[in-house]
Amino acid sequence: MLLKIKKMTLEGFRGINEQLDFTFDNRRPIVLLQGRNGLGKTSFLQAIEWCLTGQLLYFTGGDFAREDALVNLFHKGKKARVEISLVSDDGSEMRVNRTRKMGKTTGRGGSTLDVETGGDILKDEKAESMLMKTVFDSVEDPATLFHLHQDSLRQILTADPKDRSRAIDKILGTFEVRDFAEALDIKRRLTTSFKRLEQQRSSLERDKVQVAAASRERLTKQREKLETIGWKDRLSEKAVTADLKRVIKELSMVGQELGQRWEPPLVAEDMKIDQTQNTIVTLQNDCLKLDRSRISTAASFREKRTTISAALEQYGSSEKAIMQLGAEKSEDTNRKQTLEAELKTLTNELGGMEKKRQSLEEPAKSVRTLDLRLNQLKDTLSNVKSTVGDSNAQESMSENLKNSLKELQAEINTFSKQKQLVAIAIDYLESTKPNVCPVCSQEIELEKVVKDLRLQSLDELSKQTEVAMAKLTKTREDLRKLEAETVAYNRLSSERTKLDAQMQQVIIQVEGIAGQKLETADQLAKVLEALDQRIDFMNRQQVVTEAKVQAINERTKIIEQSRIMQGNASAKLQELVSRTAQGQELLSLAEKELEKLRTIESELGESKRIDLISQRLDELEDVTEYLTGMQELKKLEQEIPRIETVAKDLEKRLGRITHLEASLASISEILRTHLERSVTDLLGSLEDTINEYYTSISGHPYFVKIHLEPDPRKPLIYNVRAVSKDETISTYVPTRFSSAQMNVVGISLFLAHAQKMLTQLSSIIMDDPTQSFDESHKDDLVKLIKELSNSRQLFIATQDEQFSQGVQDTCGPRVALWQFSEWSEQGPAIEAA
Amino acid sequence: MSSSFRRVISQIAAKLPRAEDKELLNKLAETYEKGGAEAVKGILEEMLAAIESE
């Protein structure tokens, strides 16, 4: 008795919102759902699985635990309902109705089930029980038997052996055990925890116990060192306090000596060690301050000593200067008087000389001007004389020129008369026009004669007259020049006479001033030069004498300054020694003060006492450090038992992790062994059927069989091997064959499993079975489907149009085609073709 | 969760010699049934964290 799905109603389930009703014809056992991806085909197939088994396999954990993946998001009632009517070969029917309200997660909430059969309506657990028994013969995990999930098939095709093995487990119904076993595999996490705790434990030992040991060793060395510097049998807080008091007393004394106000810290008998340490630090700082004060005081004493030395030196040097210069003072006074008298004489003499020089200045100038003029006149007279001679020559030349003038005038007159005669002759001839010459009576040619007279006689006469006129003019000019030069000569001569007279007068005047006879004007220059030299000499004499007077004045001034300096130095010394004293007494007091300062400065220059105190404080610091270290060590050693307890606790926790690891390993081992054995047994029982299907869907021509077995070296990994017909050669399918072969393996495995285990339900679901098939494989699968449809009702979802057409062509009237065309919030649009 | 899983867990628990291992297996299996592998990993993490932070 095989049950087939006769009717189906669904709403609000996954991709399906509004209610859809389907009726399946018994004569059309192949229900083909065709359409693109995402239109609701898988939701339709999942609805069958959910309705009949109450769950969707592998819809657990991850995102499925975060929302309800079963109820449609847009359904008004937020409720999923699927009702399936099953009919048996004998015509009896069973109505299965499953509903679910939207929950918070996919796993929670469950569903309500009604099963109606033979007029009885069963609900929930009874209904579930009855359903399992009637439909699945109470076989476990029936979903894997009748539903080939597209995800499982897709995983089989992947190259990852682990994913493929997981997919095989999904098909065989052993996936949950595998998944659970895998979840227990937390070796890496266990190692991390173990390492963390181990680190904590080792850190405890290292940080505390080892530190205590190192500290003890260090303190022992420190104690030995302190004992060598006088602390043997004295290493106690009491001894430190006593020493500290002594140091404070010593420091107070030093402070007083340096004139410093210092408040010593209080030291109580029961002072704690940390307070003692603070006091030591304070005292160390005070030591530093006092040392700085010592350096500062020494510097001030050094400054005072330098000041006294300088004042003494000043006093001494000024006194020496006064004494030296004082002795020469009277001599200087006399000498100064003499020099001043000399200076006066020199000044007077120089005044006379300069006056004389000034008196000579004007006449000398006149002499030079007159001399120059006279020389010029002499040159001019000489030139005139060379041109026109002396007075006699000038007179003779004048006479000659006058005679020439007369002769030339007579000649001109003659030419004039001759010209008048020729003109008269021409007039006569032109008026009488004779043919013969009136003088010689020879025949003449009048015009020619007149012309000749005009051209030759008249013109010739005119030319001669002009020449004579020119000579006359020149002679007149020469005469005029001569007369002018004679006049000039006479004038110059007269002027020279006057200048000579003037010169004579000036020279007499100069001779009077100079007091000597001057033969020539040149001697005057020599007189003047000599006078200038004398003035220059006297000027130098005056400067020298003035300098001498100045030097005497300077010396006097130095004495005065020395006196002032001595006075100042004396006042300074009196101030520095704080005594009113004079002279040697004052100097003696200053020397004593100086010596005293040298002594103090020498004492302050050394810091031995402060250094010793500071050293003592350092020593006390070392002792307190040792005592503190001992206290800490004591505390640390007291802690060690507690540390050991913590370490033991950590050890215990490590043990718990080891224990947990062992438990998980034990559980995992048994789980894996169980799984491998179950799968090996199941595959062994299915192997022949698997190979029948494998051969029918384009099996390999040489490797005709496949063999699945758990990998003996790798837990939870299944090897898929292809074996030759004579079983002599085998190979791993994923390594040598195409993914289509793995697709065939997946379908074969599913069908073999279903064939064996699915004994009461006829319906088989295959979601997208041709994922990596070529045309040949598809043809073979179509043939297998046709054959299967003789005994099974098949629900097949595909988006492969070629495969769909093949099924329709081959299986013809046995096919019910449902076309999924589009999807909206209301659900998929489905048409029966 | 499938009945085969429960059956397998029962079988395996029977094979475990120590009581605490059985207890642990049942606890983990129950967790798996409720929340899958993720929940199992979660509870194991909690157990380890508890041991570490004690």
Image (tube, rainbow, N blue to C red):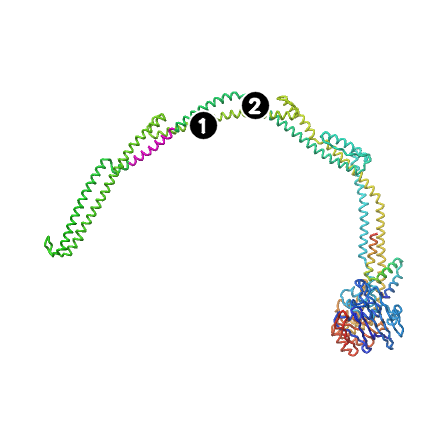
Circle 2 chain: A
Using the image, tell me which numbered label, if any, was put on residue A540. 1
The secondary structure type at the circle numbered 2 is: helix
Asked if one can make out residue A749 in the rendered structure from this viewpoint, the answer is: no
In the image, taking residue A218 as reference, residue A407 lies left or right, namely left
In the image, taking residue A546 as reference, residue A453 lies left or right, namely left
Circle 1 chain: A
Residue for point 26% across, 39% down: A484
Q: Residue most toward the front?
A: A431
**Where residue A306 sits in the image (x, y, percent)?**
64, 29
**Where residue A241 sits in the image (x, y, percent)?**
80, 34
**Quadrant assignment for the N terminus of chain A:** bottom right
Asked if residue A464 is positioned above or below residue A232 in the image, the reply reads below
Residue nearest the observer in this picture, A96 or A427: A427
**Where residue A33 sits in the image (x, y, percent)?**
77, 73
Asked if residue A72 is positioned above or below residue A471 in the image, the reply reads below
Within the magenta stretch, is there residue A369?
A: yes
Residue nearest the observer in this picture, A710 or A570: A570
Residue nearest the observer in this picture, A270 or A408: A408
Q: Which residue is mark 2?
A: A322
Marks 1 and 2 on same chain: yes
Within-10-Å neighbours for mark 2: few <14, some 14–19, many 20+: many
Mark 2 residue type: Ile
Residue for point 20% across, 40% down: A402
Query: Where on the picture, by quarter, is residue A322?
Result: top right
**Where residue A570 sits in the image (x, y, percent)?**
61, 24
Q: Earlier in the sequence, mark 1 or mark 2?
A: 2
Q: Which residues are magenta?
A: A359-380
Residue for point 24% across, 41% down: A480
Query: Where on the picture, by quarter, is residue B33?
Result: bottom right
Asked if one can make out residue A479 in the rendered structure from this viewpoint, the answer is: yes
Q: Are marks 1 and 2 in contact (CB under 8 Å)?
A: no
